[in-house]
Image (cartoon, rainbow, N blue to C red):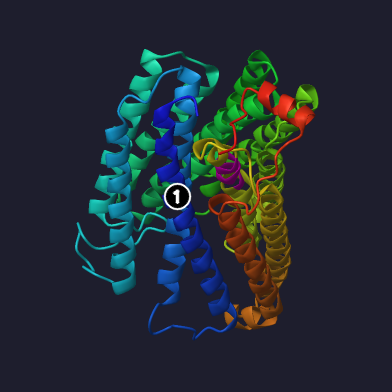
Amino acid sequence: MKYQSQKIAYAYFGVALALFAVQILGGLLAGVVYVMPNTLSELVPFNIIRMLHTNSLIVWLLLGFFGAAYFLIPEESEREIHSPKIAYLQLIILVVGTLGVVVTYLFNLFEGNWLLGKEGREFLEQPKWVKMGIVVAALLFLYNVTMTVLKGKKTAITNILLLGLWALALLFLFAFYNPSNLALDKMYWWYVIHLWVEGVWELIMASILAYLMLKLTGVDREIVEKWLYVIVAAALFSGILGTGHHYYWIGAPGYWQWIGSIFSTLEIVPFFAMMSFAFVMVWKGRRDHPNKAALLWSLGCSVLAFFGAGVWGFLHTLHGVNYYSHGTQITAAHGHLAFYGAYVCLNLAMITYAMPILKQRDPYNQVLNMASFWLMSGGMVFMTFTLTFAGTVQTHMQRVIGDYYMDVQDSIAIFYWMRLGAGVVVFLGVALFLYSVFMPRREMVRPGPIERHRLEDDPDHIPAE
């Protein structure tokens, strides 16, 4: 570990992975409710389970991004983080806010209270006091990392990462604006939801992936930065106007059907570019980096993001298709694979790369870690296909033929059972990942003279304990 303040990332990764486990358990429980509807219905209603599942996803991904920033910015800017105390204060605020959200949701506290009670906007249900805490934590974070970069070396990776993080914080301010007009509410609601995941988060994803490729492949920084600028330009160009594909049916002017259709189809371009970038970097680098698991997660991230966010998004983004498929299980299929590929895999790649360095040892438990990748990814891909088939049948029966909603749900129940099975596989993969990251391996195999010489020549090599 080159800089002591990189240890901050360990705390963020630890909390993020704990919330990751909560998110997966929530998703597994939601899958059970789909096939056995009365499960825990009196204790924890389905709407609360779903809120916990989606909110914990967003929070743990953000914590992962913060941890990644605290890990890579010292190396990129060649100086310690401006204030480690601020970083830990930020984490405490986020943890307290998260616990407050969980308690408020589970026990339905302060219902109707404008400050303490939960709100009714999907994904933005957090009470206002929690939203305020998030803003304070974001300001502390941005001050901390921006001061670090301004006083140190500037690189394309840190510049684009900061651009994404600043935009992320500023767009979240729209979460406070809740007009009484539903169409207007939805227009501004998408400023947070869409412009986060299909806009500024892509900048964060591109910069972290570029950092990993730089470290894992050994390709010249100049080549990585050229690719990075192309990807970011494509992401911003398509993502901002691509917001229009959410405006088809909310009362917005009709021209959004064409703007949304044209530009949202172009959103596949930055994801294809990111996938090409990752594989070209590995091919050009030809470097035998010891952390094979981190490289697998990085490549898996680019491939699954392309299919989940790109291909599956394209499947139902044209307004002529979306007219029938909107709000069906096809949307759920796209959402699951897109989030998993683009952001879950990215965070797990960064954690896999950083944890051995933070623990000051060689990469460890890599076979288990790679097995967890195939379990999680295989389960998520199977889940995506089952939801896609379920959504296709649902669209035809419900939107074309006109069958009743509940009759259609009974007809596609087999797909929900298969999704539950896929969820169990994903859960096993998550458990294996957590074990591989936190548990020490049982025996330390001493490298031979040739292997030892190769490792010592590796600039990223950390001697074993």
Q: What stretch is highlighted in magenta?
A: 345-352
Overall secondary structure of the magenta section: helix
x, y percent for residue 193: 46, 47
Give the position of the C terminus as an image quadrant.
top right
Q: In this view, does 156 lie above or below 189?
A: above
Q: Does residue 326 appear in this view?
A: no
Residue at (80%, 27%) from the top-left corner? 283
* Residue 396 lies in the magenta stretch: no
x, y percent for residue 384: 69, 60
Residue at (62%, 79%) from the top-left corner? 409
Kindly indicate the quadrant of the structure image that contains residue 332. bottom right
- In the image, 328: left or right of 51? right
In the foreground, 98 or 186:
98
Question: Mark 1 Cα within 10 Å, few/some/many (few <14, many 20+)?
Answer: some
> What is the three-letter code of the residue carrying label 1?
Gly
x, y percent for residue 227: 66, 22
In the foreground, 462 or 341:
462
Q: Does residue 60 appear in this view?
A: yes
x, y percent for residue 99: 31, 59
Q: Report helix, strand or loop for mark 1.
A: helix
In the foreground, 120 or 279:
279
> In this figure, which residue is indicated by the disc labeled 1?
14
Say how many tags the image has.
1
- In the image, 4: left or right of 249? left
Residue at (45%, 49%) from the top-left corner? 14
